[in-house]
Amino acid sequence: MNQGMLTVNPPLAASAGKQESQSDVGRLQQEFALHLNYQNILLEEQLAAIRQQYPLLVECDMRRRGQ
């Protein structure tokens, strides 16, 4: 279920003296000056899990997007 998980290690110089409590998404946002909406990421992960459990919902979703 964690097939799409991305793990990025920060450069050593940037992390020297910093506490390692930051998430992977937080590191990406900081390193690449990105803004990722955590709620959208969580929603997409939840939808992917639901689609995997109920494959027929994928067909309904694709039809809806095509309208």
Image (cartoon, grey):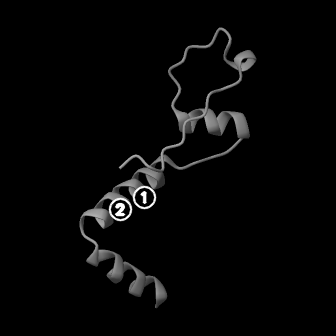
Residue flagged by tag 1: what amino acid is it?
Answer: Glu
Q: Position of residue 7 (x, y in %)?
A: 55, 36
- Residue placed under numbered mark 1 in the picture: 44
- 50, above or below 25, in the image: below
Cα–Cα span, label 2 and label 1 = 5 Å
Side of 29 where 13 appears, left or right? right
Residue at 56% x, 14% y is 19
Say few, some or many: other residues with alpha carbon within 10 Å of mark 1 (under 14 / 14 to 19 / 20 or more).
Answer: few
Residue flagged by tag 2: what amino acid is it?
Answer: Leu
Q: Position of residue 30 (x, y in %)?
A: 67, 34
Say few, some or many: other residues with alpha carbon within 10 Å of mark 2 (under 14 / 14 to 19 / 20 or more).
Answer: some
- 47, above or below 41, in the image: below
Q: Position of residue 45 (x, y in %)?
A: 40, 54
Side of 43 where 11 appears, left or right? right
Question: Quadrant of the rendered structure where residue 18 is?
Answer: top right
Along the line of sight, the residue nearer the viewer: 26 or 56: 56
Q: Secondary structure at mark 2?
A: helix
Residue furthest left in the image? 54
Q: Secondary structure at mark 1?
A: helix
Tag of residue 9: none
Residue furthest bottom in the image? 67
- Residue placed under numbered mark 2 in the picture: 47
Side of 51 where 22 appears, left or right? right
Q: Position of residue 47 (x, y in %)?
A: 35, 62
Residue at 41% x, 50% y is 42
Side of 57 where 15 appears, left or right? right
Q: How many marks?
A: 2
Residue at 27% x, 78% y is 56
Residue at 34% x, 82% y is 59
Q: Do residues under tags 2 and 1 come within 8 Å of each other at their CB atoms?
A: yes
Residue furthest right in the image? 13
